[in-house]
Amino acid sequence: MLRVLVLGSAAGGGFPQWNCRCPVCRLAWAGDPRVRVRSQSSVAVTTDGERFVLLNASPDLRQQILDNRDLHPRVGERDSPIKAVVVTNGDVDHVTGLLTLRERQPFALFGTGTTLDVVAGNTVFGVLDQGFVTRHELVLDKPVDVGSGLTVRPFPVPGKVPLYLEGPSLDIGEETENTIGLEVTGGGSRFFYIPGCASVPGWLLDAVEGAPLLLFDGTTYWDDEMPRLGLSDKTSRRMGHTPVAGEGGTLERFARAKIGRKVFIHINNTNPILVEGSPENEAVRAAGWEVSFDGMDIVL
Ligand code: MLT
Ligand code: MN
Ligand code: ZN
């Protein structure tokens, strides 16, 4: 068995975002039944229901653990089914949950050298005692045993440096250690996890072809979603995220792909696919995509 439990299906900020009154967040604030609240980007993977590997650690991790009984401590005085964490970039929504995992609990942390350096360079992460939290460098395109019966193959995808490290020489779409996708294998199956991806090149379509499951960047529906709402000058691509719709968007690029299940994850609070029954939600479903939600439990 390979089980993927979605802990957080939203992008950075979660849904609704604390300070946002965009049309989609307004529905959430009003308790509209067409939307459900979502926490920030993370999944838990297991092959035995006992040991879990987290893919990214969101600032909502404490609540995600409370909400998922399988992640509660089980035996003795101190315990956690969380045996390892693999991070795909150094973004706030993907690493700050590590701070929740302090208190001298052993686990293994996996990331590229670049991302581990970002974490090590920020002294607040020193609360993760090196004697308990072992750091393991992911080498691009080299599969690694992350424990719990799981192997992870990290590979670079189009991306950029974390927002808080952006400088004048920003290279959006670079395929480097800054932003990786993961092919996760174990329990007799496999899947791809790519929560951030600035474009969908042909090599990526080839790589995921035939996979039983793809969890993919569903940050925005439109490239100009944020500017159109007057919330930001930045397009989706400028933020390092392929839009779902439009020319070169995810729906178009994956239109002929043969993949068992295609699931959007890391969905921004502005994205109308979060509204059940909206034309955009209908459009992605018609194209064979699912919209993930917190607690979505996928068994392969
Ligand atoms: C992103 O996915 O673009 C980042 O999480 C943005 C952020 O750091 O808020
Ligand atoms: Mn993010
Ligand atoms: Zn919003």
Image (cartoon, rainbow, N blue to C red):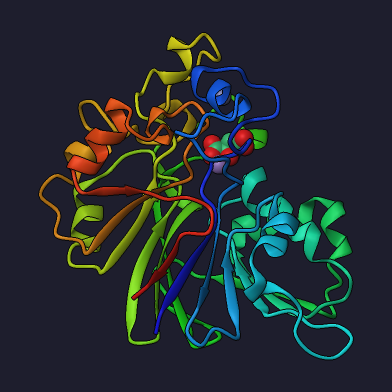
Farthest residue in the bottom direction? 76
- 248 lies above or below 286: above
Give the quadrant of residue 198. Answer: top left
Q: Is residue 118 visible?
A: no
What is the quadrant of the N terminus in the image? bottom left
- 156 lies above or below 191: above
Is 95 in front, or is 62? Answer: 62
Residue 32 location (% of width, % of height): 52, 29
Q: Residue at x 60, y 71 (%)?
A: 137
What is the quadrant of the C terminus in the image? bottom left
**Left or right side of 91 for 124:** right
Is 72 in front, or is 252? Answer: 72
Is 100 in front, or is 139? Answer: 100
Q: Residue at x 43, y 10 (%)?
A: 228
**Left or right side of 112 for 300:** left
- 258 lies above or below 9: below
Residue 2 location (% of width, % of height): 41, 79
- 288 lies above or below 46: above
Ligand 1 is found in the corner quadrant, namely top right
Give the quadrant of residue 86. Answer: bottom right
Residue 176 location (% of width, % of height): 45, 51
Residue 102 location (% of width, % of height): 84, 66
Is 17 in front, or is 156? Answer: 17
Q: Residue at x 43, y 29 (%)?
A: 271
Q: Residue at x 53, y 31 (%)?
A: 269
**Left or right side of 135 for 174:** left
- The number of callouts visible is 0
Q: Is residue 230 visible?
A: yes
